[in-house]
Image: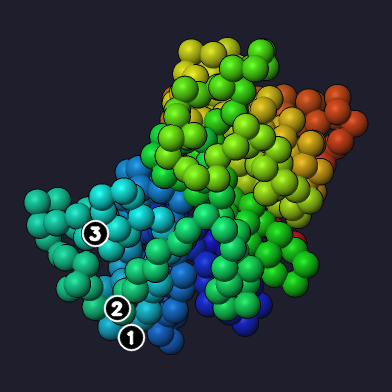
Amino acid sequence: MEIQFPGKPRFIIDAGSGIRELGKELLQSKIPVKAYIFLTHFHWDHIQGLPFFKPAFKPGNHFILYGCDEPDVDLTQIISMQMNPIYFPVAVEDMGAKVEFRTAKEGAFEVEGVTIRTQFMNHPGYTFGYRFTYQGKSIIYISDNEPYRRPNDNGEPAAGISLEDRFENFYDNKEDQFINFISGADLLIHDTQYFPHEYEERITWGHSPYTYTVDIAVKARVKQLVLFHHDPDHDDDTVDKMAELSRARLNNHNYPIPCIAAKEGDVIVL
């Protein structure tokens, strides 16, 4: 995903296979490219496009990557390992562009006048959600996330992913913190991988049913909702059906905000 702010470098979110196509578009520019790349986490579907991002091999371009460190390896090492000669013939340090790595932590920071907040999500591994705020508009990007409570809300943790053991700032009211994080956003892009019956068989996998995504959008009073991180086993008709059911659920909540299923090439103007 890409965010364009007026008069600012591009903000690229994650680096899956789609970044290759973006790279081809950027190569058409006759001026040097500067862009920020914000990584949510390091599962393959979020970083596998980086070695094939052609602008990173062009001298004069400048890319700044943000992401969190893992316990035993930092951001630079993680990306460098991906481009080890065993896996790819060109090392990070041999890319033609200037490539910088900046470790992000849970909290808030500023880049190019844009306020960025991060929060760890309920997904295996260290996984960020991002909130970008500029000139009073906020965009939330949460690619991978799972409910914090089981669907029947009987008080048991949903995932059995022991976040309490990993993050200092994990409290019993994590769901409330999450709602606060996304509250009032102009655009929420959120993991919506499953139908409820599919999710029941995949609790702890770190992804959400559409019912949860819709309900948190209503609770947080967001203004637009984009369903994201489609299941690779779902065809277009199935994704369309999920979007239709999501809109119906929003209507049942008396909260009929715009709601679409993300697809390549979509443009949303705020």
Amino acid type for the residue under numbered disc 3: Gln
Give the crowd class for mark 1: few <14, some 14-19, many >=20 residues within 10 Å.
some
Tell me the residue at 75%/72% (across/down): 135
Residue at position x 47%, y 43% in the image: 167
Residue displayed at 58% across by 72% down: 110
Number of numbered discs = 3
Residues at marks 1 and 2 touching, judged by CB atoms closer than 8 Å: yes
Q: Is mark 3 on a helix, strand or loop?
A: helix
Q: In this view, does 155 lie to the left or right of 185?
A: left
What residue appears at the point 66 percent right and 35 percent down from the top-left corner?
A: 173
Sequence-wise, which precedes: disc 1 or disc 3?
1
- Nearer the camera: disc 2 or disc 3: 3
**In this view, 153 is above or below 233:** above
Label 1 sits on residue = 60
Residue 191 lies, in percent from the top left, at 57, 37
Quadrant for residue 136, please give it.
bottom right
**Mark 2 or mark 1, which is nearer the start of the sequence?**
1
Structural distance between the alpha carbons of marks 1 and 2: 6 Å
- Spatial CA distance of label 1 from label 3 is 23 Å
* Number of other residues with Cα within 10 Å of mark 2, as a class: few under 14, some 14 to 19, many 20 or more: many
Labelled disc at residue 77: 3
x, y percent for residue 11: 52, 67
In the image, taking residue 162 as reference, residue 109 lies left or right, namely: right
- Any mark on residue 97, and which? 2
Residue 140 position, x and y percent, is 64, 52
